[in-house]
Image (cartoon, rainbow, N blue to C red):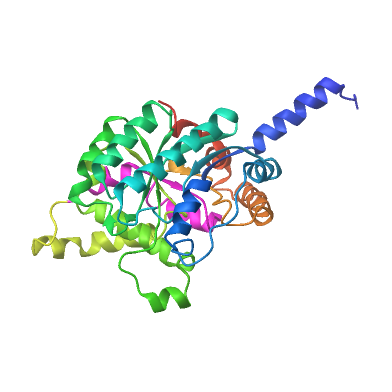
Amino acid sequence: MKKLGVSSCLLLMSMVMYAQSAIDLHSHFTTPAFLKVLAEHDALLDEGFPIPDWTVEDHLQFMRDAGIEKSVLTLPAPQPYFGDPAETARVIRATNEAAAKLKAEHPDKFLFCAALPLPDVEAAMKEAVYALDTLHADGVKLATNSRGQYLGEVALDPLMQLLSDRGAVVILHPHKPVPYAQQVMKQTPLALYEYLAETTRALANMITRNVLARYPGMKVVVPHCGSYLPLAIPRMKSVYPAVLAKQMVGDIDWDANLRCLYYDLAGAASPAVIKQMLTLTEPSHIMYGSDYPYVTAQVLTMKIKQLREELKADEELAPYVDMFMKDNAIKLFEK
């Protein structure tokens, strides 16, 4: 057998690395300004568990170990709003500028979706324009609710129009529901199940007002393997005729609403879960996500390797491995 030269070996290694690389659509970062305002309002445990430590060096090391080529950064919960809109606007602006700096310093490694200072809609629109036009954000991140202001509310329509007009990528992330059952949250942390319910709740609220259908320019990313949507949508469609007949909701354009949705694989990805997701969407709308640093780097590195192996071994899903891991994310952010 003919031996490969050094250049041929390097080429082969690069081809293998490319085939195994991924784009991480769901990762988080924190900043001193964000943590400081939470500490000042005794809100570091607002979501029921500690915010993980984060450094850019640790994040880059995780990416190298896991074969992740590029990560999309978003601000985690909670929303830094404590009754003072000006304070929220300041900390959100500082956070977005920090994310833009990270992207500028590591242009081949990071994208970012800007946070917005909701529930102040006017301030959120101003920040969205600044982030997209001046900071060159790759999209925006929206909380399922901002201190009780849920996605789907009429007051948010001007913001939805702005984001649709700009063809924005919108990454959703669950926040603590408002109101919430304190005893249940204490006994059963939000991350165990409620975040999935919260995401589904916000999306159902958007769908019943046709928000996604009326503002189709947005590309809305649903976190955590679609949350409970694969179960909730059939239920909603089944009950819909009864509530429509009682004029409890208006006409819903199911296809137009669902067409705008994309899905990340953070949380519990497996062939079985992905096949459930494919009852609502198509392979081109599913993308890898890690949820770093809310899951340790060691666990995530093991999980991404396992996911690749399971997908390659699945006859139905094997043709889509590169799409799920990287190609779909590239297309999502294309202008």
Q: Residue at x 31, y 52 (%)?
A: 84
- Please tell me in which quadrant of the rendered image residue 183 appears: bottom left
The magenta span reads: 252-281
Residue 153 picture location, percent across and down: 21, 52
Residue 108 belongs to the span the image colors magenta = no
- Closest to the observer: 176 or 225? 176
Residue extending furthest toward the front: 40
Image point (57%, 51%), residue name: 292
User: Could you tell me which quadrant the C terminus lies in?
Assistant: top left
Work out whether residue 128 or residue 281 is closer to the camera in this orientation and state it.
128
Describe residue 170's horizontal placement relative to residue 320 as left or right: left
Which residue is more in the foreground, 184 or 24? Answer: 184
Quadrant for the N terminus, please.
top right
Q: Quick check: 121 left or right of 56?
A: left
Left/right placement of residue 87 relative to residue 45 reads: left
Instruction: Tell me residue 312's x, y (percent).
Output: 63, 46
Vertical relation: 310 (above or below) 170: below
Nearer to us in this view, 232 or 220:
220
Residue 261 lies within the magenta run? yes
